[in-house]
Image (cartoon, rainbow, N blue to C red):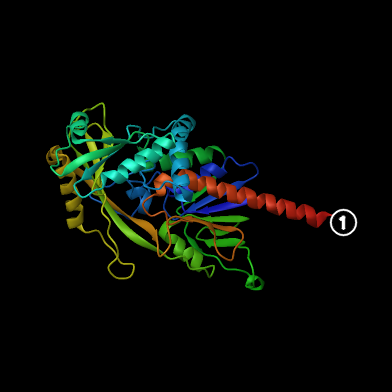
Amino acid sequence: MNVVIIGCGIVGAAIAYELSQVKDLKVTVVDRQPSPSLPPTNGEEEGSNHLFPASTGAALGVLVGIMSPKVKGSAWQMRQTSIQRYETWIPELESLTGRIIPFNRQGILSLCLEQEDLVKWGELAKVRHSQGLPLEIWDTAQLKKVCPQVEHGKVIGAVYSPSDRQVDPTALTLALVDAARHYGVTFKFGVDVLGSELPPHEHGVGEQLCHQIETTAGTISADWFVVSAGLGSCFLTSQLKQMVDIRPVLGQALHVRLGYSLGNPDFQPVITGDDTYIVPVGYGDYWVGATLEFPSNGQEISPDKKLLESVRKAAIRFCPDLSKATTIRTWWGLRPRPEERPAPIIGKLPGFSNVLLATGHYRNGVLLAPATSDKIREMITAGVRSQEEAARWAALPT
């Protein structure tokens, strides 16, 4: 059984790794970017060296699971599944590939400003406690004791989630690619998908099958196709006469070097406040981000340096020592945001029995990559079982 995955950001790489361990599946991944050993040609600024384009290359890798206000339904289940899976994923991948994946296990600290409702945070903490998950509410005295680097006058407290995490998205994606290759997955980098057309007799009623895609490397046939191409998913689905509307939201971030750790060097959680993130990446370096920039007309969008500067200033207001930091690089990328429907989009492409969507994760592609790969594996293995059952019934004598 052949599976083709289109797109090799964090989500596509995660799906490839998950499917690589399913017996009798032959998996091929196609991505328009060159080999992951080479930098991309877009989304870069001032010496950026990230290896993956669009949302993966621009992500800060902050995994907001326990701290999320989601408490039930599939949105919460996916976050919970992913947070749990990361605890085994990272050592598993490091052992298999020999790569080091920077993974911050010191949690996330969310600073609460005057306008925030601490009562709601307390209610969430009770729910998490009932689920066996820690979530702590700190007053200003405890915050000052544990994180003296925070000096914002309008901070009235903080919420600390010790079980939430942060991971380097590029290092993780490279490890997933290596691990999937170890289990036999074929990667075709630098290959662009030109489109896919149905045979004339299949333009009918009911679910149809996509048999092949046309690429710059020739025709590729498969039994299953998984579209995980972010913003590129729109073009691919339109070739199959199904429009999936995903819009770009630009995000900018910067890498700053302070030369020493903020506060206690032995306690370096991700700090967030007013939708600004301060992410420790070791050796006195921090990532700061990210902006939210929506297209002003149609799909056209470009980074606004003033907005990036406003994020830098916001980080300094929370942690004044960052005013002494030197900016090492800045970068940007485009997040895929579904229009008029919740993110992400995971499931069958309408009208097709063998085309699956795993796209439109918006700001949570890194967080939800493990749970997304689980769902795609379940869909494909269930589909294979159904096909085998149908074949057995067809073989019975009438």
Front residue (pair 78, 171): 78
Q: Is residue 278 visible?
A: no
* Spot occupied by residue 143 in the image (x, y as percentages of width and height): 21, 33
Quarter occupied by residue 259? top left
Q: Is residue 76 above or below residue 394?
A: above
Front residue (pair 94, 270): 270
* Spot occupied by residue 393 in the image (x, y as percentages of width and height): 79, 55
Q: In the shown orientation, is residue 51 left or right of residue 211?
A: left
Q: In the shown orientation, is residue 239 left or right of residue 387?
A: left
Residue at the spot x=47%, y=34% of the render? 93
Q: In the shown orientation, is residue 177 left or right of residue 259?
A: right
Residue at the spot x=32%, y=32% of the render? 106
Residue that lies at the very extreme toward the top in this rendered image: 266
* Amino acid type of the residue tagged 1 in the rendering: Pro
- The residue tagged 1 is 397
Quadrant occupied by the C terminus: bottom right
Picture mark count? 1
* Spot occupied by residue 257 in the image (x, y as percentages of width and height): 19, 38
Residue at the spot x=31%, y=41% of the render? 122
Secondary structure beneath dot 1 equals loop
Q: Is residue 353 visible?
A: yes
Quarter occupied by residue 99? top left
* Spot occupied by residue 166 in the image (x, y as percentages of width and height): 35, 39
Count neighbours of disc 1 (C-alpha within 10 A) and say few if under 14, some if 14 to 19, many if 20 or more: few
Residue at the spot x=64%, y=72% of the render? 205
Front residue (pair 186, 362): 362
